[in-house]
Image (tube, rainbow, N blue to C red):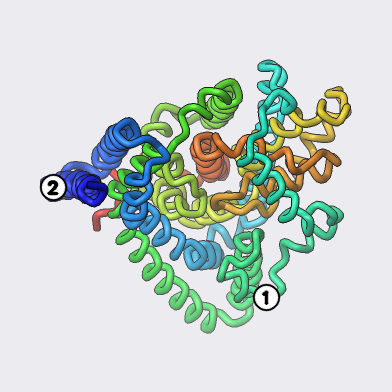
């Protein structure tokens, strides 16, 4: 009988995949198919959850087939992340405007990313105090204790490092190792390596223009090839979102979510306020925030469902360049830097909330000095946070260890981590795109006509 229900679940998934494909064949827009995939995934997930239960054997046997589509899609995106980060940064240096204004452009992007992360920390602190969240009131079950011990063990190499040592860890001693993603800071290592090659290109272009032209031609060719792969993979987005959200809803522990509802609610309020800050920044820059929401919606939706800032990078860059009017160079820098620096959700709000929740358990008063110290540490620690699942935990380890707070308590929220991480990732990606759009606007390089254009379809079908 279990085999029958397993086949029934797989058939249901394939039927919905076929429906999305039929919509594609009929020329239904990419955005509509993405949102349809989300809606169908939620419905299918709820049906499976209430039909079998989150811990049922049938559901456990079904999920690997859902993962084949959902996780398989995320892996394809992750496959192109490191090559895309590398070639995007390098190609940015071949743009004449970037070559002339690199310092100002990079400074603006980094300033916005780090500045908004500091603001995110303040928001996280404020919301935690407003809701009166306290780690001592959270019941620790076996899963929480196990997770806490795991975090404590894995943090041994990080917690005892001084800040200079942590900054040294960002440098790519072996860039080819970083291309494999072997270190938590591999992404920023690849960014730094690509930047050095970019500066070398700028120097060559001044001394040996003929060789520079050859190098530029090769870089542009590789960039076109990588972006061709990106377009192929992005076509699978509706199917990936369908499978990912169905699995998430079907296997969620609704009881745990209900018991920790206060923290979940506080987290999403903080994330919503931070997203509002992004819209305010765009408004101050003279841009319509409603237009931004409409055009960035697909990328933010995928970030929400996939919980991977790195996996969203292709959509991030594509959205900036083809919908928001950001030049390639600025979009590439903002997207790539945003993977590892200044993640507003994972490296800003989350560790700040955890620190304020945990501090009373060790007798640390939440006074002005503690809050100021926490904001500074959060901003500094936001360098090198991995843009994949687990980045928030890594950021929390850095912040809690710097404040001498018990790291193991970071495992208290394991049961609602996936739910909160969805919102955090979307805010991370929004912060990255806000940095790119704002920088392009301030430098006068934003294609305002494209930004204000009513056409909202992603260029992924070609």
Depth check: give the residue in front, 161 or 218.
Answer: 161
Measured as percent of width and height from the top left, residue 452 is found at 37, 34
Tell me the crowding category of disc 2: few under 14, some 14 to 19, or many 20 or more residues within 10 angstroms, Cα based.
few
Disc 1, disc 2: CB below 8 Å? no
State the CA–CA distance, disc 1 to disc 2.
47 Å
Residue at the location (73% across, 46% down)?
397
179 relative to 347, above or below:
below
373 relative to 70, above or below:
above
Measured as percent of width and height from the top left, residue 295 is found at 37, 37
Residue at the location (81% across, 30% down)?
359
Please indicate whether residue 34 sits to the left or right of residue 337 in the image: left
142 relative to 191, above or below:
above
Tell me the crowding category of disc 1: few under 14, some 14 to 19, or many 20 or more residues within 10 angstroms, Cα based.
few
Query: Could you tell me which secondary element the residue under label 1 belongs to?
Result: loop
Disc with the residue nearer the chain's start (1 vs 2): 2
Q: Residue furthest front?
A: 1
Residue at the location (52% across, 62% down)?
85
Residue at the location (16% across, 49% down)?
18
- Tag of residue 22: 2
**Residue position for label 1:** 174
Depth check: give the residue in front, 430 or 203.
Answer: 430
Measured as percent of width and height from the top left, residue 15 is found at 17, 46
Please indicate whether residue 228 sits to the left or right of residue 3 in the image: right
């Amino acid at each position: 009988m279990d085999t029958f229900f397993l086949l029934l679940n797989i058939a249901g998934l394939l039927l919905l995949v076929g429906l999305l494909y039929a919509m594609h064949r009929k020329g239904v827009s990419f955005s509509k198919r993405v949102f349809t995939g989300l809606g169908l995934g939620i419905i299918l997930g709820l049906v499976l959850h209430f039909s079998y239960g989150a811990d049922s054997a049938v559901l456990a046997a079904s999920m690997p087939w859902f993962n084949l589509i959902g996780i398989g899609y995320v892996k394809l995106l992750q496959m192109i992340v490191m090559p895309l980060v590398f070639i995007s940064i390098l190609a940015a240096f071949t743009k004449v405007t970037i070559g002339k204004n690199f310092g100002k452009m990079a400074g603006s992007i980094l300033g916005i990313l780090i500045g908004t992360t500091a603001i995110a920390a303040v928001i996280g602190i404020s919301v935690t105090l407003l809701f009166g969240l306290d780690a001592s009131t959270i019941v620790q079950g076996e899963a929480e204790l196990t997770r806490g011990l795991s975090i404590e063990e894995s943090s041994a190499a990080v917690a005892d490092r001084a800040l200079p040592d942590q900054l040294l860890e960002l440098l790519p001693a072996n860039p080819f190792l970083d291309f494999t993603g072997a270190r938590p800071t591999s992404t920023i290592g690849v960014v730094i390596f690509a930047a050095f090659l970019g500066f070398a290109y700028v120097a060559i272009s001044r001394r040996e223009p003929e060789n520079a032209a050859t190098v530029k031609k090769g870089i542009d060719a590789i960039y076109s090839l990588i972006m061709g792969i990106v377009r192929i993979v992005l076509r699978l987005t509706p199917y990936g979102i369908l499978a990912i959200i169905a699995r998430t809803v079907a296997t969620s522990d609704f009881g745990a979510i209900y018991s920790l509802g206060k923290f979940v609610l506080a987290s999403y309020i903080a994330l919503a306020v931070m997203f509002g800050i992004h819209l305010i920044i765009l408004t101050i820059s003279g841009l319509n925030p409603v237009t931004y929401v409409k055009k960035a919606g697909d990328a933010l939706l995928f970030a929400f469902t996939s919980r991977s800032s790195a996996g969203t990078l292709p959509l991030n860059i594509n959205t900036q360049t083809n919908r928001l009017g950001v030049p390639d160079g600025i979009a590439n820098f903002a997207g790539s830097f945003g993977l590892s620096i200044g993640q507003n959700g994972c490296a800003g709000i989350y560790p700040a909330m955890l620190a304020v929740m945990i501090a009373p358990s060790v007798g640390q008063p939440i006074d002005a000095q503690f809050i100021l110290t926490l904001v500074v540490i959060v901003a500094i620690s936001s360098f090198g946070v991995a843009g994949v699942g687990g980045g928030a935990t890594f950021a929390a380890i850095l912040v809690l260890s710097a404040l001498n707070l018990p790291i193991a308590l970071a495992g208290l929220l394991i049961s609602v981590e996936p739910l909160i991480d969805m919102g955090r990732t979307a805010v991370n990606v929004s912060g990255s795109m806000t940095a790119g759009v704002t920088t392009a606007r301030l430098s006068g390089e934003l294609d305002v006509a494209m930004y204000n254009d009513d056409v909202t379809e992603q260029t992924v079908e070609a």
